[in-house]
Image (cartoon, rainbow, N blue to C red):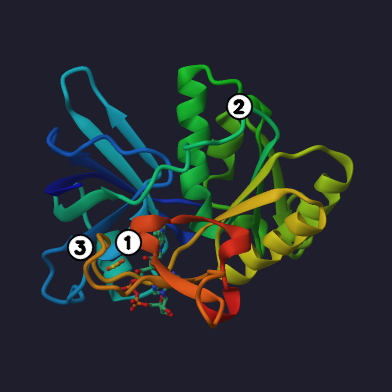
């Protein structure tokens, strides 16, 4: 983990109203892996007291040590909106990379990733990295990517260009499968083998994905986007309830920023999150 000043290179509004922000990052910052996140803030006087967590969408390192980090940010409140209003040349504070890589102990085939909204970011990073490294999972993996309407499927084209199989889903049928991602997943698992289902998106979506995976007897892991204060295990603000047989009430707490953000879905106590 490092704390550094990152200089904005470009700020592009993409489909769905998200901003694709690309920053120059000092060479002292360790290279990020898919599934990791960074805490971002700006120097703007109105920026909230605490930095905000965002998944790392991409990380390019040049032979000369130069590096660029990409984020896909939806402006929902003060912090994210101020980040999205940055102009090229302006600076942000970056603390990261934080959390674990999702590219740890993944099976060699039959991986399904289910993404909602900007939850596509870690999976796009993973697929693009596999494609660059010639890992066959870039092609064999299926990404089920959903949003309410087609015009909210941010970076769907980039996902398709990355080479993986893509199943788009929209509530209104304006692109791909008509319905929710967990329904598309149920249809897929009824006909195809899968070794692992990954998910990232709104919590109700990930809970439904976990239920469908369990019905089909397939292991599932969920990447949590819990509200965070520090990002590196100091504030306890990201505690999530996980099953624990040795506790009288059947659960204990783990920190999403330190132990996650990816958790085995069957450990998560969704009603207590
Ligand atoms: C590990 C992690 C990765 C994330 N990755 C991304 C990403 O790639 N792109 C992206 O746009 N956002 C991502 N988020 C969510 C992002 O951190 C929040 O949207 C942001 O903190 C909101 O800050 P704000 O000051 O703009 O809004 P606030 O004023 O703090 O809140 C505005 C609204 O956003 C909601 N909100 C606050 N925090 C979250 C959250 N963590 N998740 C969902 N809604 C929230 C609030 O309930 C409120 O309704 C991620 C969160 C985590 C923990
Ligand atoms: S965000 Fe502070 S402990 Fe996890």
Question: Could you tell me which residue is drawn at 46 percent across and 51 percent down?
Answer: 14
Of residue 203 and residue 89, the one placed in the foreground of this image is: 203
Of residue 129 and residue 16, the one placed in the foreground of this image is: 129
Ligand 2 falls in quadrant: bottom left
Question: Could you tell me which residue is drawn at 11 percent across and 74 percent down?
Answer: 45
SS label for mark 3: strand
Q: How far apart, in angstroms, are the residues tagged by discs 3 and 1?
A: 9 Å
Q: Which residue is mark 2?
A: 137
Marks 1 and 2, the one that precedes in the sequence = 1
Q: How far apart, in angstroms, are the residues tagged by discs 1 and 2?
A: 28 Å
**Circles 1 and 2: CB atoms closer than 8 Å:** no
Q: From the top left corner, tell me how far across and down residue 216 is, in percent.
A: 81, 52
Q: How far apart, in angstroms, are the residues tagged by discs 2 and 3?
A: 34 Å
Q: Nearer the viewer, mark 3 or mark 1?
A: 1
Q: Which residue is mark 1?
A: 53
* Residue 124 visible in the picture: yes
Residue 58 sits above or below residue 83 on the image: above
**Circles 3 and 1: CB atoms closer than 8 Å:** no
Is the CB–ligand 1 distance for label 1 below 8 Å? yes
Q: Left of 75 or right of it: where is 14? A: right
SS label for mark 1: strand
Q: Which residue is mark 3?
A: 41
């Amino acid at each position: 983990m490092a704390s550094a000043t990152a200089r904005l290179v470009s700020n592009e509004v993409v489909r769905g109203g998200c901003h694709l922000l690309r920053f120059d990052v000092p060479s002292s910052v360790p290279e990020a892996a898919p599934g990791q996140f960074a805490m971002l803030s700006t120097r703007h006087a109105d920026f909230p007291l605490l930095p905000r967590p965002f998944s790392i969408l991409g990380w390019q390192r040049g032979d000369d040590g130069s590096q660029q980090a990409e984020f896909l940010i939806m402006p929902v409140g003060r912090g994210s909106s101020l980040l999205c209003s940055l102009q090229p040349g302006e600076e942000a504070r970056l603390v990261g990379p934080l959390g674990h890589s999702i590219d740890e102990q993944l099976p060699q085939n039959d991986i399904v990733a289910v993404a909602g909204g900007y939850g596509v970011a870690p999976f796009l990073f993973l697929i693009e990295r596999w494609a660059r490294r010639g890992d066959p999972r870039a092609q064999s993996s299926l990404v089920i990517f959903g949003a309410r309407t087609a015009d909210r499927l941010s970076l769907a084209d980039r996902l398709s260009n990355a080479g993986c199989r893509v199943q788009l889903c929209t509530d209104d049928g304006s692109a791909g499968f008509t319905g929710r991602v967990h329904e598309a997943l149920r249809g897929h698992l009824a006909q195809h083998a899968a070794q692992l289902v990954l998910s990232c998106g709104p919590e109700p979506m990930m809970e439904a994905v976990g239920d469908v995976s369990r019905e089909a007897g397939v292991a599932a892991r969920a990447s949590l986007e819990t509200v965070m204060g520090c990002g590196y295990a100091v504030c306890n603000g990201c505690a999530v309830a996980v099953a624990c047989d040795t506790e009288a009430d059947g659960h204990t707490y783990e920190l999403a920023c330190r132990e996650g953000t990816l958790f085995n879905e069957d450990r998560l106590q969704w009603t207590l999150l």
